[in-house]
Amino acid sequence: MSTGHAHGQSMPRKLAIATIPLSLLVLAIKLAAWHLTGSVALLSDALESIVNVVASVAALVAIIYASKPADHDHQFGHHKAEYISAVIEGVAIVVAALLIFKEAAGELLHPTMPTDIYIGLGVNVVASLINGVWAYVLIRAGRAARSPALVADGKHIRTDVVTSIGVVIGLGLALATGYPIFDPLLALAVGAHILYAGWGLIKESLGGLMDTALTQEESEMIRQAIMDNAAGSSGVHDLRTRRAGSAAFIDFHLVVSEDMPVGEAHDICDRLEAAIKKAIPGASLAIHVEPEGVKPHGVRVRLS
């Protein structure tokens, strides 16, 4: 394994490890804010942070498992474990939303004005700033490393930031108007928002489990690599791609003349494989060589 590839695998793991104590710190801050004020909105915010801690542990486990090399039972690797973790993250967000609904609904019937609002808001803002910066780091690093689990963790923490913003608005309105009902109302609105975010994450992650093709940009890079390096062959067809976490799988049929020596056809395959792997790092290729005269099918790549 190259040093660059090893670094690419270790970075998501390091960030996932760092997320756990950071999530515990944010949870402690938010529980303190709730204890000071008695606000149901701040309690809802803390409930989501509890889910964040659990989800962060799940993300770390998935990243470690996904980085395991291929074995006898999983010959294409363990990359899809990250998608499973991302689905769990989405479900965790939905659970957090339901907990928020439960707490807010009870307070809606008998709203009470929170105490020490200014202190509670100040404490909550500190937690939100920590979460906001860390969510940005996780999402950016996760996309660069093609780590679905890390991106999902970042998006989960980002929903926590949105929750906190809603909480601040609700408490601010309650304080400004003297109507405590704004506290549970904003908690309900925040719950609806993160419920939508959770469903979006589940849907996106399930797409990865269903062997989503590489992006249009990546597909064009593959086509260009083939066109530039397929000299000596007669054509390429049945080009297929799929993404599994940080891994990309590509296969296609290479058409050559019937009298071409096996060694020469093999050289063309080696040239194509090297070019495509340069364009799509970490790609795994399967090239099927077939003689002219076979009816082409699937996605074709025109060489001229």
Image (cartoon, helix red, strand yellow):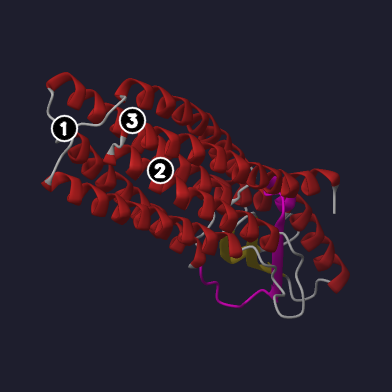
Find residue 48 and report its horizontal and vertical position in percent.
40, 47
Residue 55 within the segment the image draws in magenta? no
* Image quadrant in which you'd find residue 145: top right
Q: Which residue is mark 3?
A: 165
Residue 211 in sight? no
Neighbour tally class for label 2: few under 14, some 14-19, many 20 plus, Cα within 10 Å: many
Q: Nearer the viewer, mark 3 or mark 1?
A: 1
Q: Are marks 3 and 1 in contact (CB under 8 Å)?
A: no
Which residue does the image show at 30% across and 28% down from the upper left? 168
Could you tell me which residue is drawn at 67 percent across and 49 percent down? 280
Which residue was labeled with disc 2? 46
Question: 252 or 77, which lies in front?
Answer: 77
At label 3, which amino acid type do we have?
A: Ile
Amino acid type indicated by mark 2:
Ala
Binning the other alpha carbons within 10 Å of mark 1 as few (below 14), some (14 to 19) or many (20 upward) gives many
In the rendered structure, does residue 286 fall within the stretch colored magenta? Answer: yes
What x and y, as percent, mark residue 93? 39, 53
Tell me the element at label 1: loop
- The Cα–Cα distance between marks 3 and 1, rounded to whole angstroms, is 17 Å
Q: Earlier in the sequence, mark 3 or mark 1?
A: 3
Q: Which residues are magenta?
A: 276-300
Chain-order first, disc 1 or disc 2: 2
At horizontal 37% and vertical 27% (from top left) the residue drawn is: 120
- Foreground pick, 222 / 35: 35
> Which quadrant: the N terminus?
bottom right
* Amino acid residing under circle 1: Pro
Which residue matches tag 1? 180
Drawn side of residue 112 relative to residue 166, left or right: left
Asked whether the viewer can see residue 280, the reply is yes
